[in-house]
Amino acid sequence: MGSLTSPYGVKGWLKVYSHTSPMEGILEYDRWTVDKDGVERVYEVLQGRRQGKGLVVQLAGVASREAAEALGGATIKLATDELPRLSAGEYYWYQLEGLKVTTIDGVELGRVDHLLETGANDVLVVKGGPDGKERLLPFLPDEVIERIDLETGEMRVDWDPEF
């Protein structure tokens, strides 16, 4: 959902990098699971607001600059049951990451490593195929994306494996 980047001020506030759209969407959640170096802890969000071009937040139990510094670089996670339900054919990025990608002709391209937001459409970064290529596939349902099966962990695409 985002990350805590650095302290803001001296009273424990933190700068937030949000992966949500709009970016303020992350502030709608009352509790965040914060992962710092593989150690997870749940924090209550006391306050949050837009500050300049970004966001800042105050978490319960983080009352000093030093405490905020200790959380710099941590990842913000949410329980999946807290996320809004999506309509049919809509997916969260985390659901697509790791899916095996094959063409409609059965050629394996690799797995979805991560996604990029470009403005026009999201882009799948596919890595780890037999040919070792990294591919950038536009996430365009019914044009490029033929089928997504979350249960089997597979995605079928209409894509030339030479690209």
Image: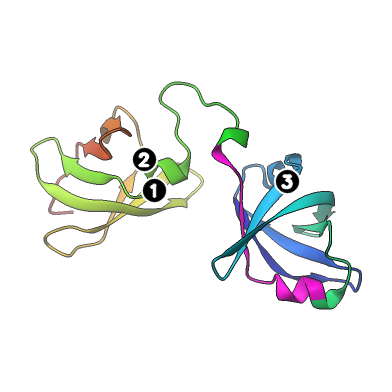
Q: Alpha carbon of mark 2 to alpha carbon of mark 1: how far?
A: 5 Å
**Picture coordinates of residue 86, whole percent (x, y):** 52, 26
- Amino acid identity at mark 2: Phe
56 or 150: nearer the viewer: 150
Which residue is drawn at the image coordinates 71% and 60% (left, top)?
A: 16
Q: Nearer the viewer, residue 142 or 37?
A: 37
Residue with the mark numbered 2 = 139
The residue lying at 29 percent from left, 31 percent from top is 149
Return the x and y of residue 4 as percentages of the image width and height.
68, 64
Query: Please, is residue 40 above or below residue 112 in the view?
Result: below
55 part of magenta stretch: no
Residue behind mark 1: 123
Residue at image position (33%, 50%) is 98
The circle drawn on residue 72 is none
In the rendered structure, find residue 31 and report the number of the disc placed on it. Answer: 3
Q: Are marks 2 and 1 in contact (CB under 8 Å)?
A: yes
- Magenta stretch, residue numbers: 67-80
Three-letter amino acid code of the residue under disc 3: Arg
